[in-house]
Amino acid sequence: MATFIPPSERREQSPHLPFGDRREAPFYGTDILSVSQFKRADLEYIFGVAKEMRAMVERVGTFDLLKGKILANLFYEPSTRTSSSFFSAMERLGGSVIPINEVTYSSVAKGESLPDTIRTLECYADVIVLRHPEVGSAELAAKYARKPVINAGDGIGEHPTQALLDLFTIEEELNQVDGLTVTMLGDLKYGRTVHSLARLLSLFVVRLNYVSPEILSMPPDLIEELSSSGVSQKEFNTLDPVIAETDVLYVTRVQKERFENQNEYEQVKGAYVISQEMLQEAKDEMIVMHPLPRVGEISMEIDSDPRAAYFRQMEYGLYVRMALLAMVLGKA
Ligand code: NCD
C-alpha cells in the first residue's frame, strides 16, 4: 500500500515549477475539498479576488492570467452550471479546458478506477475539477493527484465552490452576513449545497432555519456539528412561521437521483412551491436563492420579483470560480 504523502509536501518536491507561479500566493497548489478548510479571512481574500475578476470581465471580457494552463473538467454526474461556469472561468482567464462531461465515452466506461483516471488527466492538465456521485471521492482523487483537485460535488457530501458563490451572493446582495436569518428549504437530507453552505455560515453570527418534510431533514450529525460551534438552528415543516424573519430564503430541489425508494420521492417531490402569495409576509430587502436547477420549487411568477436572486447567483459563481482557479494555480 502506498504511503500517503500530503499534497503540500508532494508539490514541494516537484522540480517543475512553471515560470511565473508564485509559491507564496495563498492557496497555491491547494485542493478545494470542503468548506471546513476556510476561515473568515480566507473568504475575504477569495471574495476580494472575485471582485477583481468581475471588474476585469466587465472591462475586457477575457484576459491572459492563466494563458498556457489547462483545466481537466471531469464530471461523473449531470451538470450545466458548475461545469460550464468552470469552463467559462478558465477560458476567460486565457486557459483551456479538457471537458469530460460524459464519462460513458471515456475509459471510465471500461472500468477504470478514479485514481487511475485522475493520474491520467494530471499528465495533461494543471488543475482538476471533479464531480462524482460518491461522498469522499474528491478527497480520494486529491490523495492520488499531484495537481490541485477542486471538489465540484461529491454525492450528498459537499459542494464547496457552490457554498462560496452562495456566500458571495449573500454578501454582495445584502452587504453583510453577520446578523442574518437564513432559511434553508426543501431537500436538506440529500442536498449537498445546503450541507456546505450551513457549515460555511457557521463562521458567522447567523440564525439558521431548516424547513423540510420529516424524511428530508438536515442530517443530525451536521446539526450537532453546528450546535457545538454555537449556531442557532431551528427545524420546521412549513415556511409560514419563519418567512417574516427570513433575510435569505435558500430553496433546494428534491434530489430525485438520491432516493433508494422512488415511492418516497413521489410523496415529497412537490412538498413546497414558493409562490408570490407565500412571500407576502417576507421583508422587502430579503433575497430568494436556489443553486438550480429548479424543478417546480419556485413558481416562475417570482422570477421578475427583485428579491429573486437565483439568476444573479449564477453570475457571481463565474467570478468566484475564476478566483479559485487563479488562486490554486498561483496567479492571484
Ligand atoms: C446543485 C448540485 O449539483 O448539487 N446544482 C449545482 O451545482 N448548481 C443542486 C442540485 O442539483 O439540485
Image (cartoon, rainbow, N blue to C red):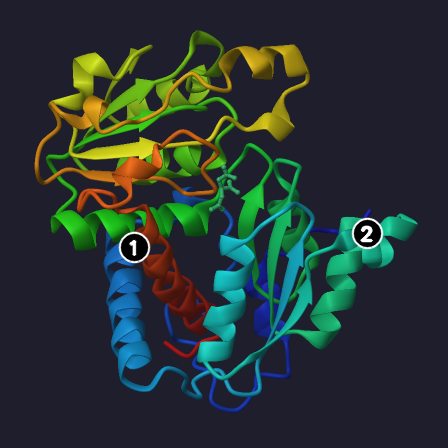
Rendered position, 75 above or below 295: below
The outermost residue toward the front is 301
| Residue in view at x 68 percent, y 18 percent | 260
Q: Nearer the viewer, residue 236 or 45?
A: 236
Residue at left 14%, top 37%? 286
Q: Is residue 21 above or below residue 235?
A: below
Element class at badge 1? helix
Q: Is residue 112 visible?
A: no
User: What percent of the width, then of the height, locates residue 158?
Assistant: 50, 39
Q: Amino acid at mark 2?
A: Thr
**Residue occupying the point 40% across, 33% down:** 194
Above or below — where is 23 with respect to 245? below
**Real-space CA distance between mark 2 and mark 1, rounded to the nearest whole angstrom:** 33 Å
Which residue shows up at 24% across the image and 46% down it?
304
Q: Earlier in the sequence, mark 2 or mark 1?
A: 2
Q: Number of callouts in the render?
A: 2
Q: Position of residue 50 (x, y in %)?
A: 30, 67
* The quadrant where residue 238 appears: top left
Residue 173 percent across, percent down from the top left: 17, 51
The residue to which callout 1 is attached is 312
Q: Which residue in the structure is indicated by mark 2?
A: 104
Q: Secondary structure at mark 2?
A: helix
- The quadrant of the rendering that contains the C terminus is bottom left
